[in-house]
Amino acid sequence: PICCPSMIYCVLVTSFFRLVFATAI
């Protein structure tokens, strides 16, 4: 995912994608 200037947003998006990826498996 693309990291925005706000670090919190980047962490949230990364954790969200990891959650979706883990659920897909």
Image (cartoon, grey):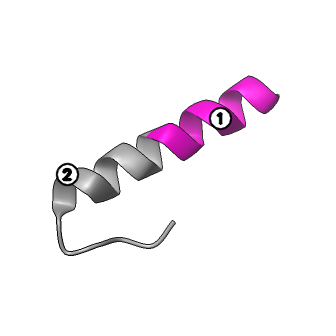
Screen quadrant of the C terminus: top right
Left/right placement of residue 20 relative to residue 25 reads: left
Q: Position of residue 3 (x, y in %)?
A: 35, 71
In the rendered image of this protein, does residue 4 appear above or below residue 7? below
**Residue beneath label 1, please?**
20
**Residue 21: quadrant of the picture:** top right
**Residue beneath label 2, please?**
8
Q: Earlier in the sequence, mark 1 or mark 2?
A: 2
In the rendered image of this protein, does residue 24 appear above or below residue 12? above
Measured Cα–Cα span from mark 1 to mark 2:
18 Å
- Disc 2 on helix, strand or loop? helix
Q: Residue reaching furthest right?
A: 25
Left/right placement of residue 5 relative to residue 24 reads: left
Q: Position of residue 18 (x, y in %)?
A: 56, 40
What span is in magenta?
16-25
Q: Residue at x 27, y 54 (%)?
A: 9
Give, as a three-letter code, the residue at label 1.
Val
Q: Residue at x 34, y 44 (%)?
A: 12
- The secondary structure that most of the magenta stretch takes on is helix
Q: Count how many numbered circles sit on residues in the image.
A: 2
Q: Residues within 10 Å of mark 1 (few under 14, many from 20)?
A: few
**Residue 22: quadrant of the picture:** top right
Q: Residues within 10 Å of mark 2 (few under 14, many from 20)?
A: few
Q: Residue at x 42, y 50 (%)?
A: 13
Q: Residue at x 31, y 50 (%)?
A: 11
Left/right placement of residue 2 relative to residue 18 reads: left
The circle drawn on residue 3 is: none
- The reply to whether discs 1 and 2 touch (Cβ–Cβ < 8 Å) is no
Give, as a three-letter code, the residue at label 2.
Ile
- Disc 1 on helix, strand or loop? helix
In the rendered image of this protein, does residue 22 appear above or below residue 21? above
**Residue 9 part of the magenta-drawn span:** no
